[in-house]
């Protein structure tokens, strides 16, 4: 066997291994596609010019009133409360050092959001406002592999009657749901990361290429639409026909460009009026 044949067989084997690694879980495809055409308001329908901070109760109430789905972020506080907040640290939004995980909710609920008179809510508070009127896209902010956040989130959602999907950048959060609650729709969040971010090279490559799907086996993919020219996403979308959600869309022009390639969008700073107008799934 000559060298060319060996190299060709090796390349073919590596490609097949890559395809196997990135393939999603097709069992939830039909249920995920129910959300085709949905627009999810990123951290709620927030607008600081009107005193409505991101991930605040008024932002979520505005999304419900306007019929948009809601994307929100959940951390676990030091005392085990499910706190709705986006960033890994408190400095940008609250102007103080520290993390959600390092403080009790009694401390956190006194920190104003973005200079407003609003404060970070608990996930339970948000569920009461939404009350099943629009779907929720819940991002789990899990650091590491300990999944207490997943357990407590599922405990709360088990008594919620509205439509929701789970997503995370951390494949181990999705692996927990894959193992314990495979019926819950789960999505792998990702982007094509720049080396300048300082991420561990192996983690950066695995996430960018969607090789991490071998752990999470997601039902859908949520990818940064500005950096989506990656082979793993193309395979998921074109070969396996996985539902794909675009984040974060910030203009009508970008929404129009996303329409042929994505099934749903996560948006902010404008109100979609294109193919992604509705925030409600087709079965509502």
Image (tube, rainbow, N blue to C red):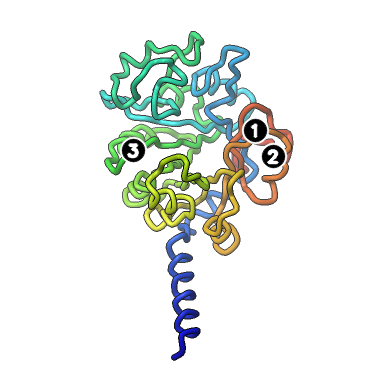
Report which residue position mark 1 lands on: 250
Question: In terms of secondary structure, where does tag 1 sit?
Answer: loop
Q: Earlier in the sequence, mark 1 or mark 3?
A: 3
What residue is at 38 percent from the left and 52 percent from the top? Answer: 202
Q: Position of residue 123 (x, y in %)?
A: 41, 26
**Left or right of 90 on screen, residue 256:** right
Is 204 placed above or below 109 here? below
Report which residue position mark 3 lands on: 143
Q: Is residue 34 visible?
A: no
**Left or right of 210 on screen, residue 33:** right
Q: Residues within 10 Å of mark 3 (few under 14, many from 20)?
A: some
Instruction: Name the quarter where the C terminus is drawn.
Output: top right
Q: Earlier in the sequence, mark 3 or mark 2?
A: 3
Q: Among all residues in the image, which is located at the extreme bottom?
A: 1
Which quarter of the picture shows residue 152? top left
Q: Is residue 238 visible?
A: yes
Q: Which of the pair 17/127 is nearer the observer?
A: 17
User: Could you tell me if the residues under marks 3 and 2 are in contact, i.e. CB atoms within 8 Å?
Assistant: no
Which quarter of the picture shows residue 46? top right
Is 262 placed above or below 4 here? above
**Left or right of 128 on screen, residue 143:** left
Q: Residues within 10 Å of mark 2 (few under 14, many from 20)?
A: some
Report which residue position mark 2 lands on: 254
Q: Position of residue 82 (x, y in %)?
A: 35, 27
Q: CA distance from mark 3 to mark 2?
A: 31 Å
What residue is at 48 percent from the left and 70 percent from the top? Answer: 15
């Amino acid at each position: 066997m000559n060298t060319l044949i060996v190299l060709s067989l090796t390349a073919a084997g590596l490609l097949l291994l890559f395809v196997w690694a990135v393939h999603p879980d097709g069992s939830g495809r039909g249920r995920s596609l129910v959300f085709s055409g949905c627009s999810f308001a990123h951290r709620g329908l927030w607008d600081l010019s009107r005193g409505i901070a991101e991930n605040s109760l008024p932002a979520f109430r505005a999304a419900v009133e306007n019929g948009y789905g809601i994307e929100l972020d959940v951390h676990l506080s030091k005392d085990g409360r499910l706190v709705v907040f986006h960033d890994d640290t408190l400095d940008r939004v609250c102007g103080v050092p520290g993390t959600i995980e390092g403080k009790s909710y009694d401390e956190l609920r006194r920190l104003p959001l973005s200079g407003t008179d609003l404060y970070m809510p608990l996930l339970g508070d948000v569920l009461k406002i939404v009350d099943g009127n629009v779907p929720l896209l819940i991002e789990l902010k899990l650091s590491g592999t300990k999944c207490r956040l997943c357990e407590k989130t599922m405990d709360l959602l088990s008594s919620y009657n509205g439509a929701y999907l789970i997503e995370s950048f951390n494949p181990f959060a999705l692996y927990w749901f894959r193992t314990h609650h495979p019926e819950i729709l789960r999505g792998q969040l990702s982007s094509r990361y720049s080396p300048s971010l300082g991420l561990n090279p192996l983690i950066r490559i695995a996430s960018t290429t969607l090789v991490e799907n071998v752990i999470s086996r997601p039902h859908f993919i949520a990818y940064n639409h500005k950096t989506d020219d990656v082979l793993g996403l193309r395979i998921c979308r074109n070969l396996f026909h996985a539902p794909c959600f675009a984040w974060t869309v910030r203009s009508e022009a970008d929404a129009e460009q996303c329409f042929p390639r994505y099934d749903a969008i996560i948006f902010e700073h404008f109100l979609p009026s294109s193919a992604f107008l509705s925030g409600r799934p087709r079965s509502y």
